[in-house]
Amino acid sequence: MKFTEFYKKWEDRLGVPFEKYGIIVSKYPWHVLMVCVVINCLLGIGLIRIEAETDTETLYTPQNSQSKVDRAAVQAVFTEDKSATNFYSKSVIEENMYADFILKAKDGSSILTTTYVDETERIYNYIKDNVNVTSGGTSVGLTNVCALRNGNCVVEGDVVFSTAFRTAMTANTISYPLFNLESLSSLFGDAQSSGGVLTSAKMVKVTFFLRQDTTAATSLSEAWEDRYIEVLGTMSSSLMDIAYSTSSSLDDELEKNVQGDIMFFALTITMMLTYAGFATTGGDCVSDRQNVGRAGVLATCLAILGSFGLVSAAGVKFVSIVGTLPFLVIGIGLDDMFILMSCLADCSVKGTIEDRIKETMRTGGVAITITSITDFLAFVIGASASFISVRNFCLYAGVAVLFCYLNQLTFFVPCMVINERRMARSSHCGTCLPIKSREDLRAEGKSKCHAFLCGGQVPKKRSDNESPLEKYPKLLFQYIVEQIPGKIVILALFIGYLTASIYGITNFKRGMLLSNLVTEDSYFYTYSKLIENHFTTEIPIGFIITSALTYSDITTQNHISDLLSNAKADVDINPSFTFDWLTDYKSSGSYSAVSETSFISGLKTFLTTRTDHANDVVFNSAETSIVGARFYVMTNNLPESKQKGNIMLRMREVADNSPLPVVCFSAPFIFFDEYAYVFSITMTTVGIAIAAMLVVTVLFMPHPLLVVCVTGTMVMICAGMFGFMYFWDLTLSVITMIHIVMSVGFSVDFSAHICHAYITVDGATRKERVHKALDRSGGPIINAALSSIMGILILAFSSSYIFRSFFKLMFLVMVFGLAHALLLIPVIFSLIGPVTAATAAVKPATDQDESAQSKSVPIEYQNKSFNKTESEERDKVSGTTQRGLTANGITESKDD
């Protein structure tokens, strides 16, 4: 059996349940419609349980990552929080609570002058004296909440106020990067040095570390942070610009991220209602379908309400990026709507309403089912990702797509039936009152204007109710793909497209900037941009021995020395810095290795004088053995996310190659896992999604050429998405990963529509079938793409990077999908597509013939006298039959 014949028989089988559903809806449209509305509204009540997840670590780091496993192992050994006794930032396991500020000279000059240092100290003292909270009726200030070392507040950057620093600054002899054993590289922005001396710095950063050793201390520190933000928000300086942040700023600002853009959704709904009405406006006062177009938008809005309510009621937390979904779902809904309306317009005007709805569901129902399943599967697969933000977004999106599809069947299709009944009664599209045709009104002496505005009749052919957007844009594509020069230009353009995509793929970056998680008007955005662009990133990396060892043993000591030497040999590790208590202890007068007992006794004495090492050794309860120890190396400046991820992986490899029971960990590693693994996770997810799309295509369109075209288009669009991210200054991160996984499903939609249209139309030549396929699906594809772009266009003006990046990638997938569906695939089909051989001896019925045959016959009864099979009725839609007559008799159609 030929592939095309098999495909048609297979589609007939697929269409049977949709035809049966069409019969039910044709008989009971209001019942189905009301059930849909009630169910969606009831599910929408679930929105009262909606909860937001704003914890950055939870959202944007992989679940069960290696860093989280290693952190748990370190916490099992180093259990005591030292923020109230002996705080050192290098030894924190989880990010410690803090508050900091950055000062920059307004004129951009170096701040290494007495004037600017005095101003910095004035602001520092103002914060110490004026940021207070009330606890138990007592005013509590910085000294009550700060982390302590030797009884004093730990403030990183207060070295700037010391007499030694001021003296060295005056003499231009500030040693850099170490000054009096304190690192300056993290304190100054845009620092410049020469010969180991700091010569210039444009910014200075001061950080207050806070206590979190008890629940009460943590609560007090949180309250102080909130007050700190309030005070700094009103503080000003005539000499310096101030940027500020706290440890909770990102989470707090993330919670506000989408709230300022909710108004965009209301504006988008208004735009979509207007566009849907305009795109479906055509014909006269009877055949006009703009109210049906608006019903498609309302069906989508109900889908958003019902799906969000259901998912919220199920306990799935709302994440900020879910705020983009309403803009996306509207585009999906209008895509389905335009396909169904096009299929209805293709139906024979001589059929009953039930016949036309059956035929619409047979073709359009299958078409929107294919695209809805692909979109749904893409999100289901995305929900398996190890990032909570991706998972929750895909759960919301998958259910929304499912509801959107169901609402098109249970809300929009009944609306089509109701509209068809109205047209059958020759009722006005606005008032629903019976009206006369324009010809009858003119015959009664009415003016041309009155007849045009108030007259109408049931449509006799497809063009009677097509809007300009449905009629004319597709003509351009039909003309281009049918001309040889047009085909050559199209193929050349796509070769250029692939070349640009490959270039972009080889150059695009990965990683997520924290500033991208908040809006540009946020104080945290200003602060983060300064940190990202003007300060160095040097990370202390710890090697933690998690089991008891005999440290007096020379073999153990050699293993530790080898471990640190191997780490310092890495190109991104500073070879001049090691924080190694064992080496320092061995160099002290307290060292003894006669026995493990003497080793520990001497070490305890040593640690009383070197409190900077005291946090890095853990004794057992009897203090007779060492059950845990930490050693540190320091990275060089790591400006790129890729560098951060790679150094983490290489240091883990150093630890893994050591015979010691050692774990490599640093608090920032929790976020470095995203940098290291987002590419592989994205590629795996996209690969699985493409494989799933391939299976769906084989099941619903089992024709080799169609499978190759749809799959090839999908791969090309995904390649374009990755490549053009580089040109649009987007990096691969958790945020853009969501958009890319989503685009896999959407990349199938338009290509599936054109492939489905091509294989279901009849034609004696490839050119004829391409022409008919574009006539059937070109208008819906164009309108679906335009409506989706309009739906997300408003996001281009959002202050949120999440929304803007969503706009950029959705714009790309829509443009690429449109170009592949209406240019590349038609050219391929015009060259190698299957054809149905039919002779020209039988003249197909023209629009005029149908009009003449059906004139004055009520549309509900026009087909009552015909006793045709369903197959023959479908054949009449395309103007031909499956059997054609030749001069010698009857011949069966054949497929190439």
Image (cartoon, grey):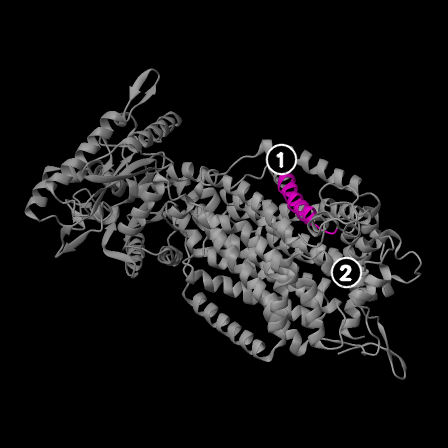
On the picture, is 413 further left or further right than 152?
right
Q: Main secondary structure of the magenta part?
A: helix
Is residue 867 rendered magenta in the image? no
Answer above or below: position of 200 versus 10: above
Q: Name the disc covering residue 313, or none.
A: 1
**Which residues are the magenta region?**
287-306
Q: Position of residue 74 (x, y in %)?
A: 39, 43
Among the 4 quarters of the image, the one containing residue 824: bottom right
Decide which of 526, 648 is in the foreground and name it. Answer: 526
Decide which of 435, 203 is in the foreground and name it. Answer: 435
Q: Is residue 94 visible?
A: yes
Quarter of the image with the N terminus is: bottom right
Amino acid type, mark 2 = Lys
Is residue 301 rendered magenta in the image? yes
Residue for badge 2: 461
Answer above or below: position of 5 versus 601: below
Q: Position of residue 195 (x, y in %)?
A: 12, 57
Helix, strand or loop at mark 2: loop
Q: How packed is label 1: few (under 14 Cα within 10 Å), some, or many (20 or more)?
A: some
On the picture, is 805 further left or further right than 144?
right
Helix, strand or loop at mark 1: helix
Decide which of 174, 870 is in the foreground and name it. Answer: 870
